[in-house]
Image: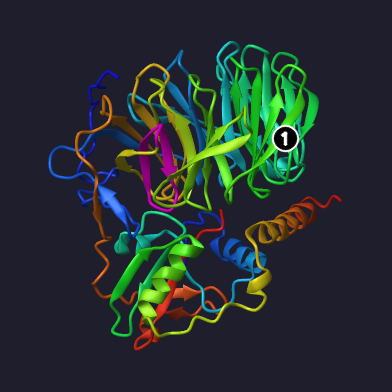
Amino acid sequence: MQAVPAGPTEADGQTDARGGGVPVVASGPSCRITGSGPVPYAYHGEVVVGLDPEGVIVDRRTGLAYVACSRSNSVSVVDVERAAVVATGEVGAEPIDISLDTRTGRVFTADARSDQVSVIDTATNEVVTTIPVGSYPAGLEIDEDRRRLYCGDAVGCTMSVIDLDRLERIAAVPAELGAGAIAVDGQRDRVFCVNFVASSVTIVDAERLEVLGQVPLRQGPCAIGVDNASGDAFIADSLASTVSRLDPEAQAVRAELVVPNAPVGLTMGQDGDRLYVANRGDGSVSVLGLDGAEWSRIPVGAAPGGVTEHPTRRGRLLVANAGSGSVTVVDDLLEGPPPTVLEEVEHPLVGRPLPAIPLVDLWTEELRDLGEWAGRKYVVNVFASW
Amino acid sequence: MNVWEGVDPFTEARQFCELWGVGGPVLVDPDGSFARQLGIRGVPTNILVDTDGTVTCVGASTPQALEAAVRRLLGPDAALDPPAGADQWSWNKELDHIGEHVARRIVKEDGTS
């Protein structure tokens, strides 16, 4: 892999991506960070977009990124080089995933609470039509060779097949509850649909649109990528904090890769030697070798989800951070496996007192603080509804 | 502690708690300022606190990791009572249950059946 020259960074690799100058740490109990020496990544910038951004895609023709902001019901258009939002367009309710047809310049969003796919003309950034799909569409993937768009319908338990040129739903392949993330293996005529609730993956013959098999996975699978060389699929199991490496021929998981905490996003590196996993529970992206070795861990914004590699700038990652409502643009500088092993470190809060800050009680709406539990042993679970 | 809801945090958090059957106190940190002060960068995250107010663990988000962290916090002699029905509990059954709730919620919101 060629080293990517760092762009105009807002923060160097040892400070917060938001430029606050705060030392960055991962948040798991067994966090690992790089040892001494320069970190193997460089921040290009962080862009505030709409609320709860989940999906992100880059147009190779223009260098513009399109971000599905699920709680704003909108798509933010980002000039990646300038790290700035240049346009915003409304779509349906709760757009989760996003995809791009480079041939026509159309962007598609899976509008989960509208049961539709919105079609955006990137020349005007306006919705030109909507396509009804199954209930609660949550994942999209383009099959350029067949001129199709696949859509995982989570509650409908189907994978919708859309004709990219006619913009019509032409088939619905049975999947399972929580159908969402999709990957296409064009070389082997396979489509994979990951089922979050059923904890499985549906393997489909792309030519005949017939189900080849359903393979059980660890809990909460929600992102997938295919290794072109082997045909293996890598699937992020969000509730198990693992990535399953699936052998589609054997219809079996051949390995489980351990990642920090709640992997929600995943994309295969363009060089074919690594994958990138966005850890929602850790605020980081893990750079993993295909054997599961964690090469580096890149701190990003809060609660990251969708991650994509820039199509024309190798190693440049765009990460949608649901918690901070932003997109981190960061360059992975590693040319291969690092010479040193990452070190285990504890979160800096461990061993220190938990501050007592007043917060509003959800049920009574009165101010309370954690000091109420002084003298007891207790657990604070930090959660969001998405 | 609920964080980063963005839109209508109290409604979203209440619906989530009803969906998952979350009982007990829930504090709301809508803009994540408290989480940021703690250095929490993602969800879900668990923070374990000892009697003197000292944090003993941050993270532990999988059931196995949380149980191990709780055992360390309580000490080797402490008995952890499994929740009622735990012997018959399974992830897949639980996820099926959640799926039914999600489906019902969406149907209800859409007004369709």
Q: Mark 1 — residue? A: A116
Q: Quadrant of residue B32?
A: bottom left
Farthest residue in the right direction?
B113
Q: Is residue A358 visible?
A: no
Callout count: 1
The residue sitting at 21% across, 39% down in the picture is A13
Residue furthest bottom as drawn? A375
Q: Nearer the viewer, residue A180 or A192?
A: A192
Q: Residues within 10 Å of mark 1 (few under 14, many from 20)?
A: many
The stretch in magenta equals A275-291
- Above-or-below relation of A310 to B112: above
Q: Tell me the chain of label 1.
A: A
- Left or right position of B57 against A382: left
Q: Please tell me whether mark 1 sits on a helix, a strand or a loop.
A: strand
Q: Is A135 placed above or below B31 here? A: above
Q: Residue at x 57, y 15 (%)?
A: A105
Residue B59 in the magenta stretch? The answer is no
Query: Is the magenta region chiefly helix, strand or loop?
Result: strand
Q: What amino acid is found at the position of numbered circle 1 in the picture?
A: Gln
